[in-house]
Image: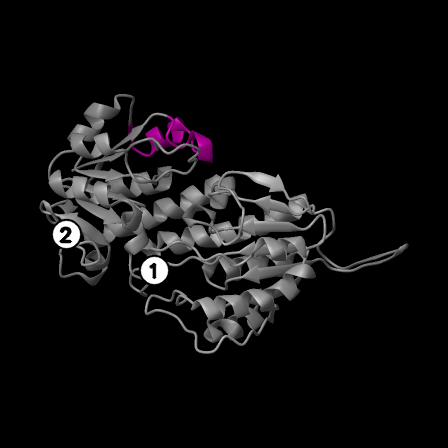
Amino acid sequence: MLCYIPADSHSGEVRAALTPATAAGFVKLGLTVQAHAGLGAASGYSDTEYQAAGVTLVSQHASALAGADVVLRVRKPPPHDVSAMKRGAVHLSFLDPFNEPDLVTRFAEASISSVSLELIPRTTLAQKMDALSSQASLAGYAAVIQSAARLRRALPMMMTPAGTIMPARVFIIGAGVAGLQAIATARRLGARVDAFDTRPVVEEQVRSLGAKFVKIDLGGTGQTSGGYAQALTPDQIVRQQAGMARVCAQSDIVITTAKLFGRRSPTLVTQTMLNGMQPGSIVVDLAVESGGNVEGIVPGEERVTAGGVTLIGHPCLEGTISYHATQVLAANFAAWIAHFWDPGTRALRLDTSDEILRGCLVTHGGAIVHPLFVR
């Protein structure tokens, strides 16, 4: 069975779906592994390391794609790649299926079994495959590091011969995987940290990391069965913004992490709130790719407002630490392959009764099979 890992066609993508370590594991299973030459160069993995692990490097993308039984990549493929794949092949990547109905249809028409990393269930059994969580954790860490590097203040309290430097104040909005990692990182660096989430259940986790949980009376809130925050009503959003404005005004760094699965991210930090922040403050929006939590922020841009607040709209902050982002992402791919690998036939066995596969398989056998996308 041939597994091919192409270079990602998405502009600016520096992560890869394979490391030499996971490649060696694939070879041990019985897979023949091909990868595009230079696959890991941007994340610090050399062609020599891949070759030593048993990977055959190729430069002819079209022929490698046409012969592959399994294709692994970070981002969704260009449409012509889907048409060029072998019928019955398996394609695994972040697919953004809610926003790509035409791509989903194309996969079905090409009889490709497409698997969306975003849809892997957040269960104990699937934890090793949870690419959203692994990347979000690194993004939360990187958000703190990137903002601290731009802040013209020290983060920790420091006793100096000339007096005491008070700790910087960091406000984390959203205490999911990314938010909790951001809290932990900021606390390790010595900052005073406040955090807010619409889910009261996470207050204990926030406090356990040494942060203060900001309480805003929103009425009834909660989370979905998948652990995501439920969408707020317009009235709740207004009340939330009023409560957060006071905290933003006294914060040196604000990091937003609120994403709604399959929907546009809510606007949480308005221009009025930005106007109330001190010059030199930093705002990082981890939801910028899905619409953004910060009014006026632009994906891929870093700019300073008229009031002197720096807005960081990096669309993939985990990519700034691409070596480890690739390491954990490739491990997620490897865990998925290992789970569905049949050692007897030395091939993937896609058992549609498996709860993990039911959760993430979008197209199969020439049809759209995921209930969220069946038309």
Circles 2 and 1 in contact, beta carbons < 8 Å? no
Please tell me which of labels 2 and 1 falls first in the chain: 1
Residue shown at 13%/34% (left/top)? 86
Residue 111 shows in this picture: no
Front one among 238 and 138: 238
How far from the left and from the top, in percent, is residue 132? 38, 53
The image quadrant of residue 196 is bottom right
Does dot 1 land on a helix, a strand or a loop?
Answer: helix
Q: How is the image coloured?
A: one colour
- Residue at the spot of label 2: 350
**Which percent across, then down, holds residue 228?**
39, 64
Q: Is residue 233 above or below residue 93?
A: below
Closest to the observer: 234 or 366?
Answer: 234
- Name the residue beneath numbered marker 1: 127
Stretch in magenta: 38-56
Check residue 75 in the rendering and tell me which mark sits there, or answer none: none
Q: Amino acid at mark 1?
A: Gln
Q: x, y (%) of residue 98?
A: 29, 51
Asked if residue 233 shows in the view, the reply is: yes
Q: Is residue 88 above or below residue 227?
A: above
> Which residue is at a point 32% across and 52% down the rendered structure image?
118
Q: Residue 66 lies in what quarter of the image?
A: top left
Q: Position of residue 220 (x, y in %)?
A: 44, 78
Q: Is residue 308 left or right of residue 221?
A: right
Q: Residue at x 48, y 70 (%)?
A: 236
